Image (tube, helix red, strand yellow):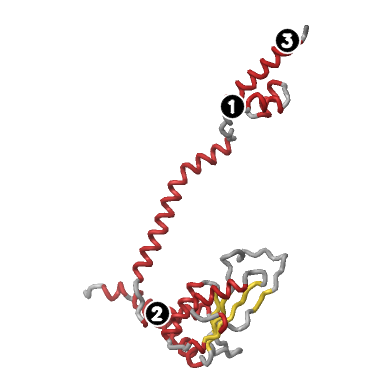
Amino acid sequence: MKIVPMVAARTDARDRARELRLKGWTYDQIVEEVGCAKSSVSLWVRDLPRPAPNFTSAERARKAARTRWDPVLAEREEHRKRVKEEARAEVGQLSDRELFLVGVGLYWAEGTKDKAYARRERLVFVNSDPDMIGLFMRWLDLLDVPRADRRLSLMIHESADVEGAEAFWAEITGIPRSDFLKTTLKRHNPLTVRKNTGEAYRGCLVVKVAKSADLYRRVEGAWYGIVGGAQWRADRMSDWPAMQSPVV
């Protein structure tokens, strides 16, 4: 005699569950509302479309902020690329003099330098940036440094792709791997958190120039010539207003 009311109640619960699901309620919310098992609710509403995500107020605020800022960030990125491209185009082809001066500055920033307490009058350049290495090699070409006088070696963590890195630098420099000196492997410390990992990590390339004492001295002299020339220009610029003042 009680079966019919129970069936009616279950039908009412099913209908209520479907109604709530169409309004975007989650399974847990429906279970709490109708008082049925989650498995029953799942069975009743499985043919209905999934509701849209129910974002919290904070999530809605973040989504609105992203919607508002995405066009701004895209415009900034476009501006960034445009400025870089315009600057690149302005440089154009370097003259030999310009390349020489750039190379001097590059070496003095990144190369090994002589000290009064430690004589190192030999060109030694170490870097991990392929563009820097490529420019340095081109600079050595300008200075007529024979390929045979260029001693290349790799410094890299032992956990990296050593053979791949050697092949990479051989392609960048145009010097065969067979001509490289022995690679220096850095011991891996698992406690150290390193960011220079992954396929892009190629270690550092060391470029030593044999019999380069006089060339080093020339580079050092040229560097101080650049410093002096820049100071002269600064002095001239500081005097510019006075030089332009009309004579009374």
Say above or below: 118 vs 81.
below
Q: Which residue is mark 2?
A: 99
Say above or below: 121 vs 159.
below
Marks 2 and 3: CB-CB under 8 Å? Answer: no
Say left or right for 197 vs 90. right
Marks 1 and 2: CB-CB under 8 Å? Answer: no
Locate residue 197, reporting x and y percent: 62, 65
Going by the numbered disc 1, the residue's amino acid type is: Leu
Mark 1 vs 2, N-terminal side: 1
Residue with the most extreme left position: 248
Mark 1 vs 3, N-terminal side: 3
Question: Mark 1, mark 2: which one is toward the viewer?
Answer: 1
Going by the numbered disc 2, the residue's amino acid type is: Leu
Q: CA distance from mark 1 to mark 3?
A: 27 Å
Going by the numbered disc 3, the residue's amino acid type is: Pro
Mark 1 crowdedness (10 Å alpha carbons): few <14, some 14-19, many ≥20: few
Locate residue 219, reporting x and y percent: 46, 86
Say what secondary structure mark 3 lies in: helix
Q: Which residue is mark 3?
A: 5
Q: CA distance from mark 1 to mark 2?
A: 70 Å
Residue ID at (67%, 26%): 43
